[in-house]
Image (cartoon, helix red, strand yellow):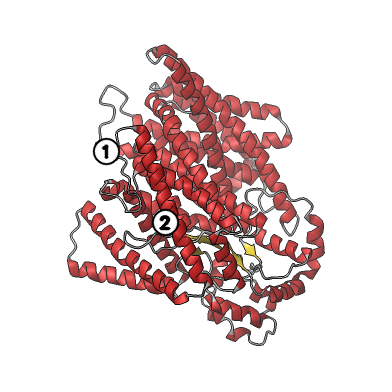
């Protein structure tokens, strides 16, 4: 259930969001199998014996190991080994996703709480034409539902369009579209954001400085996202643009519409990724069949490939692994089998020359990470941001939504480990978040307020 | 201090972070249910009657305490199952995290969440103009709230350890003791704003719980002495 998040949105351009959570593929499975068998044949027996009915707790989450759809059925022993390897590092991957989601939410909440621009109502997007200023509740509800329908149909149309383009290999068009939209995001929205922040804190900045700052920010961002760049910088940029998008949504979506849209989009996500004819599922499967990465501008990946690509010269003598690295060089986001020796995963991402590669096992012991679509980031942040903005200024609600979303993410990753295919990241988290938002706002808040006023502690 | 605990002991290991967040989640759910009950009770009763409201509040607090402990128990059950899974999956047959560590982390999770919920609105208001208790309330409101919250967070941590230990070894009296302690502390907070009545006993209870948990976790006087002496 991978939902793809297409960042090509702005007021003018069509909004196309698909959130996705995808486990990394392992296209070069044959070579991986060989290597794995060579290094772990001895342990296979022991592992299989001990794997009787393992119940999976919340922390047995696989880092997202996935076999490509074109790969032949592997032996169960190998599957067991792979599962164990990845499950062992499951917790690490969950944290690798926790951190960016948390950062994004923090940025959004901080902005909402401090910059008043994003909570003023200055009009609506053209995708939500019905206003919510109507006097009666029923009318308002109807308007919000209609808004939601329009928004969702726009999203569906865009998704189908993108999938069709992908299927018919109109890569140039897609790339151009993505580049344009990320350009728009990086420059225009950043400009607005920076302007508002400066206004709030009453800091003066002259136009030339502003121009230089935004130009640098935008240019580096473009390079990082669409081409090569240090992983952390790319991640930081992706978080930034997700936060910016979320802020735009929070500002321009009317209240009830926002909640209904959140609910509807998680249902849509569920269907689009799980149904056999769902557009997102088709997109993922097509990408896997062709052994290509999904567009880098749409997905947040927690580990990177290009170091492996650069390892190719070092690994020339190794026969079976050649395939591995060939495929690896294509995409930056294919992730490798988990590493044994390296306890500090981050080191595997450091530039290759400093990393000694001595054995076949070590080669294949690369970091396997998880990928999460940017739309997921955006909608999580929208939820938390809306909670921060509209919940009577209450931090409890924000905190509750935050914890709910993180737990939802945990559960989703757990399911990912169990099912080993693309999963929608939105439904569980958003459901939890919505439940907690409404219940905390209406039930817990009066309770806590009363307790606090009497200074009672529970 | 609780945040420092978090940074030093939990933030390193991702597994612990997950257990922490899950613990916070469980506490949150228990809070939700208890406030639901309270809300229903309030709505069903007369809003004008002061004493009834106070009584309902007390009832709500007690009920919430009981629910929290119940959820701690549920969480314990879940963690037991998780440990079995982890053991089965790990390479060398022993779990990467022991039940005591889990108990500690779970306690911290509960504590952090309850502390956060108690304090954060206060903190946000504290950014405003500095008028504490000008309507005749105590001027020490912030200070005492801060101390009370801290003691509660620590207590939750220790209760977590004690509780899990009791569940592990099937010593029901330990579990009962934890519940009773929790009820006591909450009850003591009814003495507010007579702070002497609530803060001092709470701290005493915390010291007792700390010592008990320390002993249970395998510490002893010698360990303590060695630790202190090693430092200097």
Task: Say which residue appears at 60% left-offset and 78% top-offset.
Answer: A327
Q: Measured from the top left, where is residue A82 in percent x and y?
A: 70, 64
Q: Is residue A108 visible?
A: yes
Task: Say which residue appears at 23% left-offset and 52% top-offset.
Answer: A200
Left or right, residue A292 beside residue B195: right
Which is nearer the eye, A25 or B127? A25
Q: Which mark is drawn over residue A154? A: 2
Contact check, label 2 and label 1, Cβ < 8 Å? no
Q: Measured from the top left, where is residue A104 in percent x and y?
A: 42, 55
Mark 1 belongs to which subunit?
B
Task: Say which residue appears at 54% left-offset and 41% top-offset.
Answer: B25
**Number of numbered discs on residues:** 2
Task: Say which residue appears at 30% left-offset and 66% top-offset.
Answer: A187
- Vertical relation: A369 (above or below) B23: below
Measured Cα–Cα span from mark 2 to mark 1: 44 Å
Mark 2 belongs to which subunit?
A
Looking at the rendered structure, the secondary structure element under dot 2 is helix
Q: Measured from the top left, where is residue B105 in percent x and y?
A: 58, 44
Work out whether disc 2 and disc 1 sit on a shared chain.
no
Q: Which residue is mark 1?
A: B128
Crowding at label 1, few (<14), some or many (≥20) Cα neighbours within 10 Å? few
Looking at the rendered structure, the secondary structure element under dot 1 is loop
Q: Measured from the top left, where is residue B204 in percent x and y?
A: 51, 29
Q: Which mark is drawn over residue A192? A: none
Report the mark closest to the observer, 2 or 1. 2
Q: Is residue A425 visible?
A: no
- Vertical relation: B219 (above or below) A184: above
Location of residue A445 (image quadrant) = top left
Left or right, residue A110 beside residue A433: left
Which is nearer the eye, A226 or A286? A286
């Amino acid at each position: 259930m991978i939902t793809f998040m297409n960042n090509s949105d702005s007021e003018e351009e069509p909004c196309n969001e698909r959130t996705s959570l995808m486990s990394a593929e392992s296209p070069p499975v044959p070579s991986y199998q060989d290597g794995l068998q060579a290094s772990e044949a001895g342990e296979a027996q022991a592992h299989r014996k001990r794997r009787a009915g393992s119940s999976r707790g919340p922390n047995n989450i696989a880092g997202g190991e996935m076999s490509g759809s074109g790969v032949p059925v592997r032996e169960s022993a190998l599957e067991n080994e792979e599962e164990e390897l990845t499950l062992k590092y499951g917790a690490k991957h969950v944290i690798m996703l926790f951190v960016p989601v948390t950062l994004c939410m923090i940025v959004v909440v901080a902005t909402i709480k401090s910059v008043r621009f994003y909570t003023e109502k200055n009009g609506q997007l053209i995708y939500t034409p019905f206003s919510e200023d109507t006097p009666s509740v029923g009318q308002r509800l109807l308007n919000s539902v209609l808004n939601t329908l329009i928004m969702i149909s726009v999203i569906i149309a865009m998704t189908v369009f993108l999938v069709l383009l992908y299927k018919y290999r109109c890569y140039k068009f897609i790339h151009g579209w993505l580049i344009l939209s990320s350009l728009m995001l990086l420059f225009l929205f950043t400009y607005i954001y920076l302007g508002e922040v400066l206004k709030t804190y009453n800091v003066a900045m002259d136009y030339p400085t502003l121009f230089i700052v935004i130009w640098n920010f935008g240019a580096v961002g473009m390079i990082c996202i669409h081409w090569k760049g240090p992983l952390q910088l790319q991640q930081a940029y992706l978080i930034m643009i997700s936060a910016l998008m979320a802020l735009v949504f929070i500002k321009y979506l009317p209240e009830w519409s926002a909640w209904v849209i959140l609910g509807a989009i998680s249902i849509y996500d569920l269907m689009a990724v799980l149904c056999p004819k769902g557009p997102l599922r088709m997109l993922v499967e097509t990408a896997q069949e062709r052994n290509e990465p999904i567009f880098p501008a749409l997905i947040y990946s927690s580990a990177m490939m290009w170091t492996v690509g650069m390892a190719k010269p070092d690994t020339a003598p190794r026969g079976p692994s050649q395939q591995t690295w060939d495929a690896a060089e294509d995409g930056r986001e294919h992730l490798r089998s988990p590493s044994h020796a390296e306890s500090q995963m981050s080191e595997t991402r450091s530039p290759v020359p400093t990393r000694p590669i001595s054995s076949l096992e070590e080669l294949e012991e690369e970091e396997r990470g998880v990928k999460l679509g940017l739309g997921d980031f955006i909608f999580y942040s929208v939820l938390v941001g809306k909670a921060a903005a509209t919940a009577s200024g209450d931090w409890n609600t924000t905190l509750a939504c935050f914890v709910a979303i993180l737990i939802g993410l945990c559960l989703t990753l757990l399911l990912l480990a169990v099912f080993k295919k693309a999963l929608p990241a939105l439904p569980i988290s958003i459901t939890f978040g919505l439940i907690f938002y409404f219940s905390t706002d209406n039930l817990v808040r009066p309770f806590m307020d009363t307790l606090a006023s009497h200074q009672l502690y529970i | 201090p609780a945040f420092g605990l978090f940074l030093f002991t939990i933030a390193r290991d991702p597994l612990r972070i997950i257990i922490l967040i899950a613990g916070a989640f469980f506490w949150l759910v228990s809070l939700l249910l208890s406030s639901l009950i309270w809300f229903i009770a309030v709505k069903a009763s007369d809003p004008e009657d002061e004493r009834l409201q106070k009584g309902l509040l007390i009832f709500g607090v007690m009920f919430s305490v009981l629910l929290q402990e119940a959820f701690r128990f549920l969480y314990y059950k879940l963690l037991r199952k998780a440990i079995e899974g982890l053991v089965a999956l790990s390479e060398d047959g022993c779990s990467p995290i022991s039940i005591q560590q889990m108990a500690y982390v779970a306690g911290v999770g509960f504590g952090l969440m309850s502390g956060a919920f108690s304090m954060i609105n206060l903190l946000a208001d504290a950014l405003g103009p500095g008028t504490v208790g000008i309507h005749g309330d105590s001027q020490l409101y912030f200070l005492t709230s801060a101390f009370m919250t801290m003691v509660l967070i620590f207590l939750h941590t220790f209760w977590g350890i004690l509780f899990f230990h009791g569940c592990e070894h099937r010593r029901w009296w330990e579990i009962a003791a934890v519940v009773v302690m929790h009820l006591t502390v909450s009850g003591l907070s009814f003495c507010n704003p007579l702070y002497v009545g609530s803060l001092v006993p709470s701290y005493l209870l915390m010291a007792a719980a700390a010592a008990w948990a320390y002993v249970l976790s395998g510490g002893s006087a010698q360990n303590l002495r060695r630790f202190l002496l090693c430092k200097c």
